[in-house]
Image (tube, helix red, strand yellow):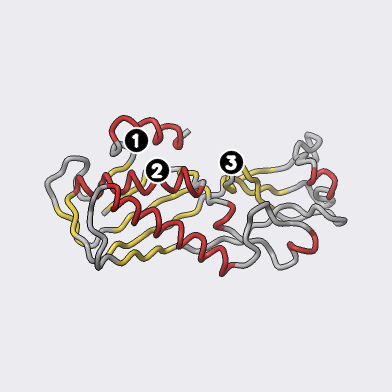
Amino acid sequence: MWKNFVLIVLEMAYFESVTSCAGGIGGNGVLINPSISMKFHPPTAWTYPETTAATDLSYFPGQPLTQNEAQLRANGDIESAVLAGLQTLQIPTTGVTVTPQYSPPLVSDCKKLTVATTGQFGFEEGGAITKLITPPGPAGITAIFCSQRNFAGTPPSLVFTMVDFIQQASVKIDGITLSEYQATLLAAKVSQYLMLNSRVDFTEEVMVN
């Protein structure tokens, strides 16, 4: 829902999808070395599974198998979005340093080979991990039901429980001075690029300060 709202507003005015902590859209203040912070359901490519994922098929399609790979992917996506946003707004990037802050979470799919999954696992929607699922104990979910994505269970005793899976990140932009208006436009462009290119599923407004 938030994703659709942002896309619609960006097409109309670019900047109404974010809020400036320094005074809001149209403010006359100046931001030196601003930071952008965000909360979201993480793209699958920004996560990594447990070490046994390759043998029990408990990874998602396109998911990095190591934390380092997921970190590099997330950092690269965030940095690219910021630089693309600056270029789109015709703001020089010479001497600008972009430093993402994000810790890839360990989240696996249920096991799709041989054994049942008794512990918590992720639920993927639209290329992002949106929820964590706990299967009914003690049997868990079989490999067959996992492959079929059958998480219905049998109420009232054998029920799968789901909780929202929200992560956060920030990015520091050094070597630059922006007006509040420019900073707000930049945050809107960054969120747009991350949604469209990296499948970040934002859960709250992007903040810039």
Mark 2: few, some, or many residues within 10 Å (few <14, many ≥20)?
A: many
- Residue matched to label 3: 126
State the SS at label 1: helix
Q: Quadrant of residue 80?
A: bottom left
State the SS at label 3: loop
Residue displayed at 70% across by 49% down: 134
Q: Which mark is residue 108?
A: none
Numbered label tally: 3
The three-letter amino acid code for the residue at tag 3 is: Gly
Percent from the top left, x then y, of residue 187?
A: 32, 48
- Residue matched to label 2: 192
Percent from the top left, x then y, of residue 136?
A: 78, 46
**Where the C terminus falls, by quadrant?**
bottom left
Mark 3: few, some, or many residues within 10 Å (few <14, many ≥20)?
A: few
Percent from the top left, x then y, of residue 154?
A: 81, 35
Task: Verify CB contact (< 8 Å) between mark 3 and mark 1.
Answer: no
Percent from the top left, x then y, of residue 204?
A: 41, 43
Sequence-first tag of 1 and 2: 1
In this view, the residue farthest toward the left is 28
Q: Using residue 55 as the reference point, say whether residue 7 is left or right of it.
A: left
- Residue matched to label 1: 10
The three-letter amino acid code for the residue at tag 2 is: Gln
Residue displayed at 57% across by 55% down: 45
Task: Verify CB contact (< 8 Å) between mark 1 and mark 2.
Answer: yes
Sequence-first tag of 3 and 1: 1
Sequence-first tag of 3 and 2: 3
